[in-house]
Image (tube, rainbow, N blue to C red):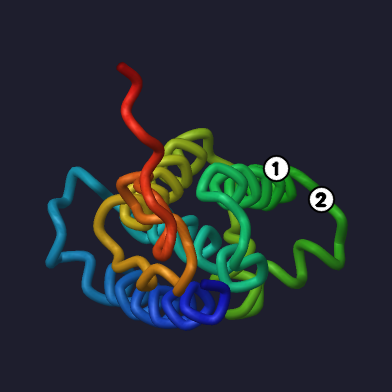
Amino acid sequence: MTLFRRRRSLLAIAGTIILGLGSRRYPSLLPAVLGKYPGDALWALMVYFGWGLLFPAASIRRLAALALACSVAIELAKLSPAPWLVELRHTTFGRLVLGQVFSWQNLVAYAVGILSGAFLESRLLPHPPAAAGSRAPSGGPRPGRSAPPPHG
């Protein structure tokens, strides 16, 4: 399971980065009313998948909590006037990872991205095949064991 999730997370990170950079490079392809927020949501989605890469056995809820905490911390760091942080935010890396200006709307976009990741992982992304000897998805008996007799 962990190797499968790591591979899936790595592919998801790569795809999300491509979509995120594309959303900033070609904003005219998206509805103008969305502004820059699709890129922010995709950034948080990438953070979600990044935590999945680091902690492949973690629950979806735990990954979402980690991604949200990380996103909020980075957004709040934009309020810091520390010279080294201001200087870092003026680099390409700093702009992409840290952003530049604090915005409450970014927090909403981050939540949308993270919830999208949790939904994708729980509903749409493929799950690894069940390992031999594991409980059947329906909760039925394990292979090689009979079901308990009915009560009656």
Residue identifier under label 1: 76
The residue located at (12%, 66%) in the rendering is 29
Residues at discs 2 and 1 in contact (Cβ within 8 Å): no
| Badge 2 element | loop
The residue located at (87%, 56%) in the rendering is 82
Residue identifier under label 2: 81
**Is 69 or 81 nearer to us in this picture?**
69
In the image: residue 144, left or right of residue 81: left
Q: Is residue 58 above or below residue 29?
A: above
Q: Quadrant of residue 26?
A: bottom left
Q: Nearer the viewer, mark 2 or mark 1?
A: 1
Sequence-first tag of 2 and 1: 1
The residue located at (48%, 68%) in the rendering is 133
Q: Is residue 26 above or below residue 101?
A: below
| Badge 1 element | helix
Residue 122 visible in the snapshot = yes
Residue at far top of view: 152
Q: Quadrant of residue 30?
A: bottom left
Which dot marks residue 7? none
The C terminus lies in which quarter of the figure? top left
**Is 135 or 53 nearer to us in this picture?**
135
Whole-percent x and y of residue 1?
A: 51, 72
Whole-percent x and y of residue 25?
A: 29, 76
Residue 37 visible in the snapshot = no
Q: Is residue 3 above or below residue 142?
A: below
Cα separation, mark 2 vs mark 1, equals: 11 Å
- The amino acid at mark 1 is Leu
Q: Residues within 10 Å of mark 1 (few under 14, many from 20)?
A: some
Q: How many marks?
A: 2
- The amino acid at mark 2 is Pro
Whole-percent x and y of residue 45?
A: 44, 59
Q: Is residue 45 above or below residue 139?
A: below
